[in-house]
Image (tube, grey):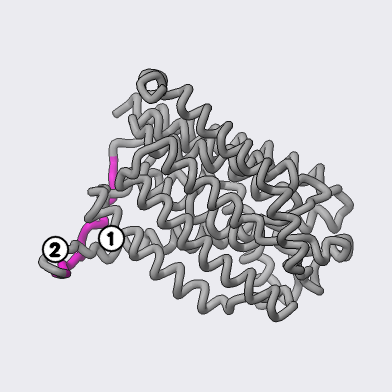
Amino acid sequence: MIGFLARYPTYRIFLTAVLTLVATAALAPFWIRLLKVRNIGQIVRADGPTGHLTKEGTPTMGGVLILVTVTGASVLMGRMTPYVVIALFTMLACGTVGFFDDYSSVVRARSLGLKARSKLFWQLVISVTTGLLAVNYAHVSTSVIVPLSRLSIPLGSPSFSLSLGGVKILVPALYLLLLFVVVAGFSNAVNLTDGLDGLAAGTVTIIMLAYAGIAFRQNRLDVALFCAAVAGSCIGFLWYNSFPADIFMGDTGSLGLGGAIAALAILTRTELLLGLIGGIYVIEACSVIAQVLSFRYLGRRILRMAPIHHHFEMIGWSETKIMVRFWIITGVLAGGGFAIYFVSRIRS
């Protein structure tokens, strides 16, 4: 069987996705039951859409199930290469921050968890660790590729070296700063997007398919298998997370999955292209920024409610309509990003 899978890598990728899909869908009812017994339910924000008040008490922290199945499938179906280790570390580390955020919300019985400052501090620690591992362990280049050109932006200087236990560690300051923006930006942006049933899980699935294609084009089967594991787990989770949701992924899932997307951009050297592939998250994050700036400096709101998916709720769109249309937008953006990557590779 191992020899057969080695001969047919695309089948192995497909099988990994199916494995995590079935595992997540099969384990979800038990996890939902446990969460209900433990009384771990969603705390709905008081200033959110009034239609969401009925979601109060719905089991949350479903992201734990996603992270566990992805980790298990990555170990079972792939190899623990430096790339996979880094992807798993970033996903699980960001997911751990989300777990404590969820736990804080449930224990304190309020919709606010960790303070924004605490989240950013730990995301800084995670991004720096990810960057140091990428440069020193996986030997990822510190040059950032400019899409549709042969140009690359060198971010390896200024840098300095540290000696830890006789091991020399290169610390490229500018590159680490970029990675902080990528990791913190996209983990928080996915978290913002996770405001409607099925929205985050569906968009992550589509983006993972794009990154599976990019990784396969780079002959990184290990990374493609990781992408397939995440996509399959999200689809399995959608069975219970689609409207009306039986369970939410919580910050554990949204921060963890955002961290996984950021790690894939770093490992495939598509940091700049991520703005297009993950464009739906850029739109969501920018809608919040624009709303805050508009209210602060102009004294009025440009949206009825932010993030932007809530704006469409307020003008009468159903959750399902918003979810499906955002999925379509994600497909167009992720497909466009993959197309640009493909053309760039041909030109080079």
Q: Amino acid at mark 1?
A: Leu
Q: Position of residue 86 (x, y in %)?
A: 36, 52
Disc 2 element: strand
Q: Is residue 266 visible to us here?
A: yes
In the image, taking residue 332 as reference, residue 118 lies left or right, namely left
Q: Quadrant of residue 327?
A: top right
Q: Position of residue 230 (x, y in %)?
A: 54, 43
Tag 2 residue: 168
Q: Quadrant of residue 206?
A: top right
Can you say which quadrant of the picture contains the N terminus?
A: top left
Residue pictured at 17% horizontal, 69% vertical: 164
Residue pictured at 49% horizontal, 72% vertical: 120
Q: Position of residue 185 (x, y in %)?
A: 50, 61
Between residue 22 and residue 286, name the one nearer to us.
22
Reply above or below: 21 against 262. Answer: above
Q: Which residues are magenta?
A: 151-164
Reply above or below: 84 against 131. Answer: above
Q: Amino acid at mark 2?
A: Lys
Disc 1 element: helix
**Residue 156 belongs to the span the image colors magenta:** yes
